[in-house]
Image (cartoon, rainbow, N blue to C red):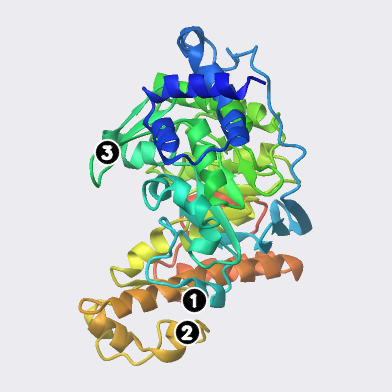
Amino acid sequence: MQSYAKSKKKLIKHSKKDNNIKRLIIKNQLNKQKLINLFCIQLDYMDNQDSKVEQLGQSENFGENPVKKLKTESLSMNKALKFVVHKTCNKARASTLTLPHGEVLTPVYMPVGTKGTIKGLTSQEMENLGCRLLLGNTYHLAYQPGGDYLEKVGGLHKFMNWKYNILTDSGGFQMVSLSKLCEISEEGVKFESPVDGSEMFLRPEDSVHNQNQIGADIMMALDDVVQTTTVGERMKIACERTVRWIDRNIQAHERKEVQNLYPIVQGGLDFGLRKYCLDELIKRDAPGYAIGGLAGGEDKQDFWKIVNFCTDHLPQDKPRYLMGVGYPDDLIVCSCLGVDQFDCVFSTRTARFGTAFTKYGFMRLKNADKEFDLKPIEEGCECPTCQRYSRSFLHNTIAKEETACHLISQHNLYFLLNLMKQFRQSILDGRMEEFVNEFFKNYFSHEKQIPQWIQDAMVAAKINLNIKFDE
């Protein structure tokens, strides 16, 4: 290990071209030991970056790892996660995921609180809905209030008064959602803030450091993310880079005893690339794995086949997280295919436009037929909204008051949390196939036809659909 004086000299040198490092020096947030631990490996890597990038660019085959001299890191000693599968039905699993802030029953839907809050709901309300694992976004939290500040106040849990578990995205998705405002290189990603135009340079080391500061129970590795339907050389480059970056993510992870790091399987709709990425990431023996790069406009037949392929190859004793998926029918299909964790902003986003989830499909509360309808959104629903408010009230306030957005969001979140709870219980009770048939019969009762992609997916999941719609 280098001396403190030598490390600091090198740190100051690199701060001239790295605003993140410069900011940390100016704020004097690093003590001696932390300075050495955080940056010695990273700066050595940067000193040789040009020659390594040249070497990486010479790889001709996605199955060949061009960085053979770099040590393959492992997370096998991680003690911050315990995953127990209690019962299965074909590929589906009823499990318990134990994290530093408590148990999570899976399969589970995880609400998205991008900036440390679920839009329209308090932490207490989320607890009352039964949520035990929610999301924050590293990119947005690093901008405001900032990783240094969150570390100073004791992490995101204390900042948002949340006593249960948190998962943080790495910032990788913003490569797609903010693609016009970012530049991607082997070293990392340069973002331009859509708010004030300021620049952020995010390397795997930076993403992990920010997530260590945030204190998430599950952290996501920074990967190279492209639009799902991308084909050809750019998808191949993204998949290879995701594999190269995973060891940098792992090396930068300082809190393995209390925080978990999930790698993300990429490869788009290319089964060969997916298999290469799966094989390489599984070698790192991570505590859990995510399936990324889907729900981006691909055909539904392609969607379920990639999910099925990934769950076929991922370890049986590790949790599997499908990123960005949150439609009710998608949750049921992918749970049948062996996925354990889901997230999506759709439940609260669509609520702000007056759309509610029900077992019979989406309900548009802005429609004229709801103006004098005194029934709750869904009869029999035990969420606070359905216990106290009518469709008529929500219809007449949705365009005028934020209260309606709050109430519909509360219902939608409860609906998805409870749907996963019911699915899990059906596995334990030995009646999952019956539950799945009943769900799809209700959900597509207006169309009176199950989409072909769902029928095909259920064949792969070994679920017999025997549904007859009423005339």
- Disc 3 residue type? Ser
Residue 200 horizontal/vertical position (percent): 35, 35
Q: Are marks 2 and 1 in contact (CB under 8 Å)?
A: yes
Please give the name of the residue rendered at 28% of the width and 76% of the height, measured from the top-left corner: 402
Crowd class of label 2 (few under 14; some 14 to 19; many from 20; radius 10 Å): some
- Disc 2 residue type? Pro
Distance from disc 2 to disc 3, alpha carbons, whole Å, reads: 42 Å
Residue 241 horizontal/vertical position (percent): 50, 23
First of labels 2, 3 by sequence position: 3
Residue 198, numbered label: 3
Q: Residue furthest front?
A: 5
Distance from disc 3 to disc 1, alpha carbons, whole Å, reads: 35 Å
Secondary structure state at the residue bearing disc 2 = helix
Please give the name of the residue rendered at 41% of the width and 58% of the height, measured from the top-left corner: 345
Identify the residue under disc 1. Answer: 125
Crowd class of label 3 (few under 14; some 14 to 19; many from 20; radius 10 Å): few
> Based on the displayed image, in which of its 4 quarters is residue 405 positioned?
bottom left
